[in-house]
């Protein structure tokens, strides 16, 4: 495995770790419980930021190879959260973690299984 291949896979694994944390944080919660829990909201937002930052570190050629993943949207989400912290819409955050994160996890699991060889 080349250094470049190893590096981007580490970023994928970092994203997976943040996804697993988010899933654990929100397990058993509904939206109303989530939005009232400041610690959980902060933890979820922080891990979404980490996901976006890690996605931004994945080389463009790898992003193009695995174009099923909405890399640009993930990175843009991170940028909106980092630069507009006081304007976070927790309904959108909730929808991301309940709808988008599970499908992202499945795509990343496939990427890790495939690697760069198809």
Image (cartoon, helix red, strand yellow):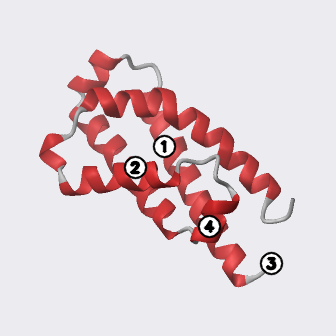
* Position of 87 relative to 67 (above/below): above
| Image quarter of the N terminus | bottom right
* Position of 37 relative to 7 (above/below): above
Tell me the number on the disc at residue 21: 1
Which residue is located at x 42 percent, y 62 percent? 53
Residue designated by label 4? 10
- Mark 1 or 3 closer to N-term? 3
Q: Secondary structure at mark 2?
A: helix
* Position of 49 relative to 33 (above/below): below
Residue designated by label 3? 1
Count residues near mark 2 (Cα–Cα under 10 Å), then give few for <14, some for 14-19, many for 20+. many
Q: Are marks 1 and 2 in contact (CB under 8 Å)?
A: yes
| Image quarter of the C terminus | bottom right
Label 1 or label 4, whichever lies nearer to me, is: 4
Which residue is located at x 51 percent, y 54 percent? 71
Count residues near mark 4 (Cα–Cα under 10 Å), then give few for <14, some for 14-19, many for 20+. some
Q: Is residue 77 left or right of residue 8?
A: left
Residue designated by label 2? 47
Q: Residue 12, image x and y in percent?
A: 61, 59
Which residue is located at x 18 percent, y 49 percent? 85
How far apart marks 1 and 2 lie (CA) works out to 8 Å
> Please, which residue is most extreme toward the left here?
86
Q: Residue 49, image x and y in percent?
A: 36, 54
Label 1 or label 2, whichever lies nearer to me, is: 2
């Amino acid at each position: 495995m080349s250094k470049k291949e190893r590096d981007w896979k580490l970023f994928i694994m970092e994203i997976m770790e943040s996804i697993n944390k988010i899933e654990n944080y929100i397990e058993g919660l509904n939206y109303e419980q989530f939005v009232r829990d400041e610690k959980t909201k902060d933890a979820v937002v922080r891990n979404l930021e980490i996901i976006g930052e890690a996605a931004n570190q994945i080389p463009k050629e790898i992003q193009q190879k695995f174009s099923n993943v909405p890399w640009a949207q993930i990175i843009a989400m991170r940028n909106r959260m980092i630069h507009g912290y006081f304007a976070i819409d927790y309904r959108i955050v909730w929808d991301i973690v309940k709808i988008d994160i599970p499908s992202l996890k499945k795509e990343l699991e496939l990427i890790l299984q495939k690697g760069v060889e198809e």
